[in-house]
């Protein structure tokens, strides 16, 4: 049977979970199948991310329109990739990079390029009559084979990830009610993905009940579905989550643990190299005081993961943070690495962090995402596949996390349908994998 090729592309402007425009792309296979992808968008974005192209016309969606990016798909990308093999994801993504020709994808826009890249993967799977995770797993194995001996020992089989789930939101995800961005839970005692999801739902409901009992906001939620209460300080959010664990009958640290997304770049002042806790009437502190504060929380709470504990370019601070806590907890670089292999390589050399957040729209193509995943795994950095605050019904990252055996996924909370689309997709994948479905356990 002849290999299916790209017959054409269609792009349109649609809306994400915050009512902001984003790019949707259809890739049409020569065999008639259609693959569709919608590009997510972040609120808490780092300056090293690939450029999300916006129109800037104040009369059209307040300047947030993406018609320029949509136009690039039709006028520039479609003619260039027409006739290319759908199975050759690397060649198509290389063509996208060649067409753009800029370091940060500012010509075509990372949103245009990613929409095409992911839609092509969907179309390739459809043309083969396969589930997306099966096709992505083939690409993953191909990437590992290309890496040769350097990738020996890296898990290649589909594996259900452990969810990292938003409970209390702050920072740019919830109107600045807290300085830190999210307090999350990880159901480390779960025996399967479906068991993990049941535990998460129980804890989410318990957090709402604890907030209500204390007379705090228990109905308002942030961009990612986590509760958005006004608290006296950041630490109170940790206290509430621990109380919710206990209310569920879970032993903190054994059955469930805390993950923190500090997102410290957004309250860091480069001029003074200091961190300002303005939203909770806190103090201004330097990197060492931040490290001391995080170390104290690790000692007193069941914290096993910290994301962006320091700012995106505070490399010296990150090195000290990793010395202090790298042997105890997972230290995730999000803004620090921005899913960019070059920045991850710098972090590996500097021994900064020990994990990386993987966000497809930070880098702009599927192939570059796979490259970052391989580099991380080769060097012992744990990957966490992540959604964005501006999400859609597109569930591609669920398939990506399973296909690459990433081990962890961070989608948001168990509220809002753009989040549940991913959780529900993984229920179907677990069912398809059968009783022998592998599940990542992290202690």
Image (cartoon, rainbow, N blue to C red):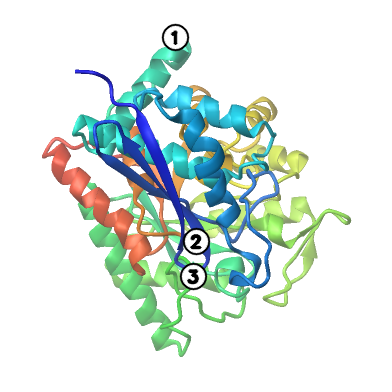
User: In the image, is 376 to the left or to the right of 218?
Assistant: right
Cα–Cα span, label 1 and label 3: 46 Å
Q: CA distance from mark 2 to mark 3?
A: 9 Å
The answer to whether residue 378 is above or below residue 22 is above
Image spot of residue 307 (x, y percent): 56, 50
31 versus 391 height, above or below: above
At 79% from the left and 65% from the top, the residue drawn is: 284
Q: CA distance from mark 2 to mark 1?
A: 39 Å
- Residue to which mark 2 is pinned: 390
Residue ID at (18%, 37%): 437
- Which numbered mark, 1 or 3, is in the foreground of this view? 3
Residue 220 x, y percent position in the rendering: 45, 81
Q: Pick the quarter of the image with the C terminus.
A: top left
Look at discs 2 and 1 and give the one toward the viewer: 2
- Which residue carries the number 1 mark? 149
Q: Are the residues tagged 1 and 3 within 8 Å (C-beta)?
A: no
Farthest left residue in view? 435
CB of mark 2 within 8 Å of CB of mark 1? no
Question: Residue lying furthest right in this view?
Answer: 271
Residue 182 versus residue 99: which sits nearer the camera? 99
Q: Could you tell me which residue is drawn at 61 percent across and 69 percent down? A: 60
Question: Who comes first in sequence, dot 2 or dot 1?
Answer: 1
- For label 1, the SS is helix
Label placed on residue 19: 3
The residue carrying pointer 2 sits among few (fewer than 14), some (14 to 19) or many (20 or more) residues within 10 Å by Cα, namely many
Residue 72's x, y, as percent? Answer: 56, 44
Q: Position of residue 197 (x, y in %)?
A: 26, 57
């Amino acid at each position: 049977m002849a290999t299916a090729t790209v017959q054409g592309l269609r792009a349109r402007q649609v809306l994400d979970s915050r009512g902001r425009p984003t790019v949707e792309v259809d890739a049409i296979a020569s065999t008639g199948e259609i693959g569709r992808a919608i590009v997510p968008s972040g609120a808490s974005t780092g300056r090293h991310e690939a450029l999300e192209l916006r129109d800037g016309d104040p009369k059209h969606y307040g300047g947030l329109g993406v018609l320029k990016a949509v136009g690039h798909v039709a006028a520039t990308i479609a003619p260039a990739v027409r006739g290319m093999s759908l199975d050759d994801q690397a060649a198509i993504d290389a063509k996208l990079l060649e067409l753009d020709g800029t370091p940060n994808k500012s010509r075509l826009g990372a949103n245009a390029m990613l929409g095409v890249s992911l839609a092509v993967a969907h179309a390739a799977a459809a043309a083969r009559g396969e589930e997306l995770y099966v096709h992505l797993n083939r690409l993953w194995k191909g990437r590992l084979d290309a890496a040769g001996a350097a990738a020996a020992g890296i898990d290649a089989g589909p594996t259900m990830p452990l969810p990292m789930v938003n409970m209390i939101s702050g920072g740019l995800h919830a109107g600045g009610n807290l300085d830190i961005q999210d307090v999350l839970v990880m159901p480390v005692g779960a025996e399967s993905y479906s068991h993990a999801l049941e535990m998460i739902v129980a804890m989410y409901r318990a957090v709402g009940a604890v907030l209500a009992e204390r007379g705090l906001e228990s109905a308002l939620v942030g961009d990612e579905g986590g509760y958005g209460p006004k608290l006296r300080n950041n630490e109170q959010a940790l206290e509430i989550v621990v109380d919710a664990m206990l209310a569920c009958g879970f032993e903190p640290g054994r059955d469930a643990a805390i993950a923190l997304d500090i997102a410290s770049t957004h309250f860091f002042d480069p001029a003074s190299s200091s961190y300002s806790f303005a939203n909770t009437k806190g103090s201004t502190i330097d990197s060492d005081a931040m490290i001391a504060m995080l170390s104290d929380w690790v000692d007193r709470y069941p914290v096993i993961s910290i994301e962006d504990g320091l700012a995106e370019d505070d490399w010296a601070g990150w090195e000290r943070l990793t010395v202090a806590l790298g042997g105890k907890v997972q230290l995730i670089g999000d803004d620090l690495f921005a899913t960019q292999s070059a920045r991850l390589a710098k972090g590996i050399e500097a021994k900064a962090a020990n994990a990386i957040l993987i966000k497809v729209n930070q880098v702009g193509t599927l192939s570059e995402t796979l490259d970052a995943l391989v580099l991380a795994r080769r060097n012992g950095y744990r990957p966490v596949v992540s959604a964005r605050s501006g999400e859609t019904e597109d569930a591609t990252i669920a398939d990506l996390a399973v296909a690459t055996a990433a081990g962890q996924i961070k989608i948001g909370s168990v509220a809002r349908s753009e989040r549940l689309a991913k959780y529900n997709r993984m229920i179907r994948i677990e069912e398809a994998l059968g009783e022998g479905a592998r599940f990542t356990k992290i202690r």
